[in-house]
Amino acid sequence: MHLGSAPGKILQSLGEFSYLTIDQIIALHYQEASRSYVRKEVNALLTAGLAMALPRATVIQPRLFTLTGEGQRVVSHVSGVPTKRVRRRDEQDKGHNSYFVQHTIATTDVLIRAKLLTRAIPGIALHRLYLERELKRKIYVAPLGQDTERQRPLCLEPDASLHFVTAGNIEDFFHLEIYRTHLREERFKRKIRGYVAYIHSTLHQQLFQTPALAIAFFCATDPLAETLLRWTEEVLHDVGQEYIGERFFFRQIATAKASPIEMYLAPVWEQPFSDTKTPLLVLE
């Protein structure tokens, strides 16, 4: 199959993002008026055994599509990217997990907007995007402010990461944290202490070959964004690291509805200890 063809483009995007909905495929490649055509092409991939549809926990849950093992091999043969092992039962279990589905869709929405941003703004290039599976069990740190003799190292597992290069060859690198619901305060604060230690280590540059680093928190509601920002300020104050507040960004956003420019360039992001709102990406 030629990856420049319509089904080929869909197959390649499934390889790049792992999971996509029909809406997300349309956002990447088509207009809304092409919805019926996109469904036809996706069904052809299902029939050919190159893609599979995850089951849905409820009828209103968006359906996720992913590659089968054969689909992985086709994409890998053309792109050279190694295949990942596909266990159909595992994928079916994921489809029944509403949290996984909603979180995956929101994370992919953020990544797709990054890709679309580079199409809209010539001065922004997406050097690399990293999916959660590429970051899993990769970043281990001893959280700052913890008794490192007694505490296990913390594994920082961002939901995804983006490495941009903007005009003037300026690099921006973001670990992305997507939060839809509230979580335990101590668990979140331990993650922030881990990020503080990570910022001060050489690990980031070793892993991603860039000194640029920030952490962006995409929150489903304003109260959630306010709470996570406050908890971050408390941690940074407790460990005497207020000055690295500029590395952390927070905002409320409906990831499925926001445009790429609204998501990345609108001056609405908040940072610890700052009264000034800022874009996530600042163009010189």
Image (cartoon, grey):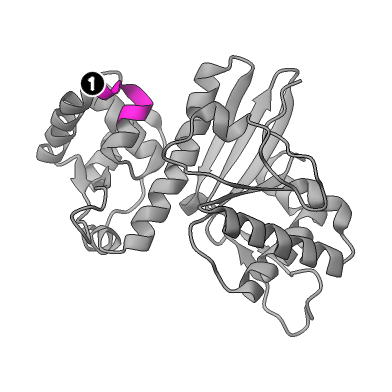
Instruction: Where is residue 75? Give x, y as percent.
Output: 31, 34
Nearest the viewer among 2 and 16 is 16
Under circle 1, the secondary element is helix
Please tell me which residue is depicted at 60% across the width and 33% down the height of the picture. Answer: 264
Which of the pair 71/166 is nearer the observer?
A: 166
Residue at the extreme top = 122
Residue 117 in percent (x, y) is at 53, 25
Q: Is residue 1 visible?
A: no
In screen coordinates, is 216 left or right of 201? left
Task: Give the residue pinned by disc 1.
Answer: 33
Q: Residue furthest bottom?
A: 150
- Which quadrant of the rendered structure holds the N terminus? top left
- The x, y position of residue 246, in whole percent, is 80, 46
Count of numbered labels shown in the rendering: 1
Q: Main secondary structure of the magenta part?
A: helix
Q: Which residues are magenta?
A: 26-32
